Image (tube, grey):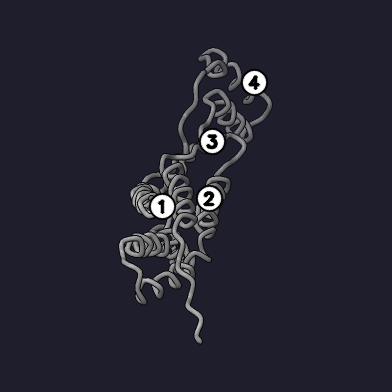
């Protein structure tokens, strides 16, 4: 029974990992209030003139109703997945960081889950014991998955913050990829706890 629960947990984790790395993790939007944008335009034009120019501009603004504009204009929108972040880092010549993110969020998790699935299906023998030792070694990096997702969120938020200004209001929202990846982490931990590798036999 325990073995079947292990297999199910590994399969579910594998199914969650793919959308977790391909679907959007975070969406960041930047909006500008229309009335504030109009006011900023008037202020910029007024800087080139004198007090009379400012008064005329304010009068025309009131006549046209620019000070009563409602709504917002979308000025910045960025949606990124884990895989997309790896590609963007690589295209920006951040090859080392891209390699680390790809290794710890895609390669090692996939390899570990596939080895765990193979381990659950093998009969007890010497090869299975060696495979168990490999899985134990990979399990030491289990918490890196969480670190990677935190790193990506910080990276995207930092980029958005660099583009923000007095008029630009930034809003961030987690995408479905974040929840898929979080669910993968939970099922991966469950699978690791259910799988018990055999102890190494002591030499006599």
- How far is disc 1 from disc 4 in space, using C-alphas? 79 Å
- How far is disc 3 from disc 4 in space, using C-alphas? 35 Å
Q: Secondary structure at mark 1?
A: helix
Residue placed farthest to the top in the image?
63
Q: Which residue is mark 3?
A: 171
Q: Secondary structure at mark 2?
A: helix
Q: Which residue is mark 4?
A: 55
- How far is disc 2 from disc 4 in space, using C-alphas? 39 Å
Q: Secondary structure at mark 3?
A: strand
Q: Which residue is mark 1?
A: 2
Residue placed farthest to the front in the image?
204
Residue 7 in percent (x, y) is at: 35, 53
Report the residue at 33% width, 49% height from top: 15
Q: Which residue is mark 2?
A: 159
Residue 41 sits above or below residue 86 on the image: above
Decide: few, some or many residues near mark 3? Use Cα within 10 Å; few <14, some 14-19, many ≥20. Answer: some
Q: Earlier in the sequence, mark 1 or mark 4?
A: 1
Q: Earlier in the sequence, mark 2 or mark 3?
A: 2
Report the residue at 52% width, 25% height from top: 34
Residue 178 in percent (x, y) is at: 46, 44
Asked if residue 10 can be seen in this view, the reply is yes
Residue 101 horizontal side relative to residue 164, left or right: left
Residue 139 in percent (x, y) is at: 49, 64
Front tag of 3 and 4: 3
Quadrant of res 50: top right
- How far is disc 1 from disc 3 in space, using C-alphas? 44 Å
Decide: few, some or many residues near mark 4? Use Cα within 10 Å; few <14, some 14-19, many ≥20. Answer: few
Q: Earlier in the sequence, mark 3 or mark 4?
A: 4
Q: Earlier in the sequence, mark 2 or mark 4?
A: 4
- How far is disc 2 from disc 3 in space, using C-alphas? 13 Å
Residue 182 sits above or below residue 52 on the image: below
């Amino acid at each position: 029974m325990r073995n079947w629960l292990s297999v199910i947990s590994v399969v579910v984790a594998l199914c969650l990992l793919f959308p977790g790395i391909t679907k959007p993790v975070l969406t960041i939007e930047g909006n500008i209030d229309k009335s504030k944008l109009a006011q900023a335009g008037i202020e910029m034009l007024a800087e080139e003139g004198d007090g009379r120019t400012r008064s005329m501009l304010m009068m025309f603004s009131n006549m046209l109703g620019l000070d009563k504009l409602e709504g917002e204009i979308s000025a910045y929108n960025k949606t990124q997945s884990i895989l997309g972040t790896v590609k963007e880092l690589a295209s920006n010549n951040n090859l080392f960081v891209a390699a680390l993110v790809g290794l710890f969020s895609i390669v090692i998790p996939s390899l570990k889950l596939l080895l765990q699935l193979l381990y659950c299906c093998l009969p007890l023998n010497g090869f299975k014991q060696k495979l168990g030792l490999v899985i134990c070694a990979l399990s030491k990096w289990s918490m890196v998955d969480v670190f990677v997702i935190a790193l990506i969120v910080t990276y995207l938020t930092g980029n958005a913050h660099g583009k923000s200004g007095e008029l630009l209001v930034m809003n961030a929202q987690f995408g479905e990829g974040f929840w898929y990846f979080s669910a993968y982490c939970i099922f991966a931990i469950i699978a690791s706890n259910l799988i018990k590798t055999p102890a190494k036999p002591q030499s006599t």
